[in-house]
Image (cartoon, helix red, strand yellow):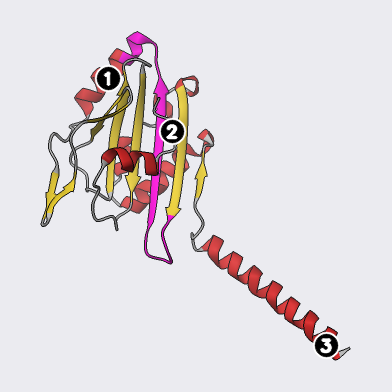
């Protein structure tokens, strides 16, 4: 009888400890998550502005009113924590598809509005951030100038073949360097660049 009581007491303590652990982990941001709910677009854009303290997300990502829901091919916000309390990465991507005339106009607007890096960003030990234009399949990526590399920046990618434009934003102020932009894009953005 005493053994049965001791066993149920251990089970109750185990359940309570598990519930406390799960509550702490989920409330402290230790579990990665993503959202593809377009209705949360402005919420996450504002959240990233608050994190960067420089409103870079608003500079990179268009206002919700500036695009039609029908033009959205893909949207995702991702939160990725790294081992215990060290850092976190947040990324956001919006891919829009246009008819040919609108696509050409949007590219023209982008080229007027943004300045892009044309060479790598150098640090004390060499290349900190490879900022040149690069390609993944038929998408051409350009890194927006005048932001904080490599932890707080944005990119514009476009595909002439598909008449799509992708706005990508990334935040992780503890990131020290980016070696390969292609690997970086595949790691932090789940869109299929086909």
Residue found at x 40% / y 39%: 189
Task: Please identify the quadrant where the N terminus is shown.
Answer: bottom right
Sequence-wise first label, 2 or 3: 3
Residue 64 included in the magenta stretch of the image: no
Sequence-wise first label, 1 or 2: 1
**Quadrant in the rendering for residue 21:** bottom right
Residue 94 included in the magenta stretch of the image: yes
Nearest the camera: 6 or 92?
6
Residue found at x 33% / y 44%: 170
Percent of width and height locating residue 88: 39, 56
Q: Which mark is residue 3?
A: 3
Residue found at x 50% / y 44%: 34
Q: CA distance from mark 3 to mark 1?
A: 74 Å
Few, some or many C-alpha atoms within 10 Å of disc 2 (few <14, some 14-19, many ≥20)?
some
Task: Please identify the quadrant where the C terminus is shown.
Answer: top left
Percent of width and height locating residue 154: 29, 39
**Of the residues tagged 2 and 3, which is closer to the observer?**
3
Q: Which mark is residue 191?
A: 2
Tell me: residue 12, above or below residue 138. below
Q: Which mark is residue 52?
A: none
């Amino acid at each position: 009888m005493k053994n049965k009581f001791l066993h149920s007491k251990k089970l109750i303590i185990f359940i309570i400890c598990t519930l406390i652990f799960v509550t702490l982990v989920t409330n402290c941001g230790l579990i990665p998550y993503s959202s593809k709910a377009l209705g949360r677009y402005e919420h996450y854009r504002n959240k990233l502005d608050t994190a960067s303290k420089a409103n870079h997300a608003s500079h990179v990502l268009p206002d919700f009113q500036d695009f039609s829901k029908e033009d959205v091919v893909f949207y995702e916000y991702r939160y990725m924590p790294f081992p215990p309390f060290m850092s976190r990465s947040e990324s956001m991507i919006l891919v829009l598809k246009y008819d040919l005339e609108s696509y050409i106009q949007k590219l023209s607007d982008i080229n007027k509005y943004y300045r892009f890096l044309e060479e790598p960003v150098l640090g004390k030990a060499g290349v900190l951030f490879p900022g040149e234009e690069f390609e993944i399949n038929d998408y051409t990526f350009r890194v927006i100038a005048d932001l904080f590399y490599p932890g707080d920046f944005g990119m514009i990618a476009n595909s002439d073949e598909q008449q799509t434009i992708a706005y990508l934003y990334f935040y992780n102020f503890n990131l020290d360097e980016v070696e390969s932009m292609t690997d970086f894009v595949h790691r932090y953005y789940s869109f299929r660049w086909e």
